[in-house]
Image: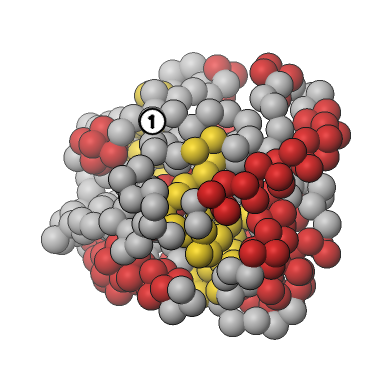
Amino acid sequence: MTKHSTQQASEVVVFLQPFPLGVAGGGPRIMRMLLRDPPVPILPICTSPLAPGQNGELHLPIRPYLGRIEHTRFHKVVYALAPLFRRWFVTRLEKLCRGSRAQAIHCVAHGGLDFYDAWGISRKLQIPYFLQVHDDVEYTSGGHVSSRFITEAWQGAAERFVVSQEMGTEYCKRYGAREFVIVTDGLEQIAPSAVPGIEQLRIYFMGLFHLGYEQNLEALIRSLELLPAELKSVHPPSITLRCGSVRSSLLRPGAEVRVLPFGSEADVHADLAGADCLYLPLHFDESDRPFAAYSLSTKMVTYLGSGIPILYHGPTGTAAYRLLRENRAAALATSLDPAEIARVLSDLLRPGFAHELAENALLLARRAFLRSEQHGKFWQRLLAHL
């Protein structure tokens, strides 16, 4: 992925991200896609407290890793300790940028102040700064990142890359009108055609299963019980979740629900061969609205290129809902009412309907989510400033 190991004497573009590139999640997936085959030498730096593993990244954590406390109700201690290490982090980052002869800094803003500190270093070194936003920073930081910091970085960046039109529009309202570029996940392979139709409901989900999706899953499981008997008699509906784990309380007795460990892209593609419907849940709770309203998940991009019909299960008014509705690219369940979800699932079994949705999804994937176009657009805008 990287070129810094063999071309350390060359000038590099520093890429700063708050996660290891090899972990599951939308942000890492997008950055893996963008940093593959870079046209210039790059130096990826992971600022997560967790070590990045074997992905060619340098590790410059913004703070120490606190172990199990990170996943308990005492996790707020993390935010209280982070400022104590900020000066150390800034000093080390500046030293790395100078030593690598950085000609630009690119940052993914997520939950800490690393993106803002890098903005300050770029000004000091008089090099271009690029800001990338996958999820709403005010939401992912839990309110611990001041809007003043986001405003300065947003307005001062040479380029602003956002995951959706909704994200860019919202950030212009909050932090000042600026030009932005939409960059998200990209597909290298797209199914040549959609499935001709479906006769049963083998529902499939892959990726991170957020706690906010639990109520979605409970409603979906109950909806399967409400399907007409003739739809269940020959091929009982089932749900497969490749998400590592879910709480056992969600798995109702008698429900055909299978939970698989996280897998590779090859595992997911093999799973898709046995799926009839791809499940795309989004948060219904108002407290999670910023997560759903402005982001487009990489899961959705993968689904669009599969040729298999998508079941969207989330509120109206989200970036994903608007895109899928405008392109008639998914069945839309916009309630937690099991009876309504059952009606949407029954519609998917109508002759021709699933095929139409899947064909529309493939058209959308070819038009807007090719990896070559996402990669080229990103690097064209970045290279213009070097």
Under mark 1, the amino acid is Gln
Asked whether residue 226 is in view, the answer is no
Corner quadrant of residue 63: top right
The one of 73 and 65 positioned closer to us in this rendering: 65
Tell me which residue sits at (72%, 61%) in the image: 120
Q: Which residue is at a point 60% across and 37% down the rendered structure image?
A: 60
Q: Report the side of 104 relative to 176 (left or right).
A: left
**Residue in view at x 41 percent, y 73 percent:** 383
Occupied quadrant, residue 372? bottom left
Viewer-proximal residue among 326 and 77: 77
The picture places residue 202, in percent across and down from the top left corner, at: 31, 37
* Residue 227, percent from left and from top: 41, 40
Q: Is residue 77 left or right of residue 107?
A: right
Relative to 237, say whether 73 is above or below.
Answer: above
Give the SS element for disc 1. loop
Q: Quadrant of residue 170?
A: bottom right
Q: Residue at x 22, y 45 (%)?
A: 199
Residue 21 point in image, percent of width and height: 45, 41
Q: Which residue is mark 1?
A: 54
Q: Height in image: 98 above or below 362?
A: above
| Relative depth, front residue between 361 and 176 | 176
Q: Is residue 6 above or below residue 163?
A: above
Where does residue 158 sit, x and y in percent of width and height?
58, 75
So how many labels did they put on this image?
1
Q: Is residue 57 visible?
A: yes
Neighbour tally class for label 1: few under 14, some 14-19, many 20 plus, Cα within 10 Å: few
Q: How is the image coloured?
A: secondary structure
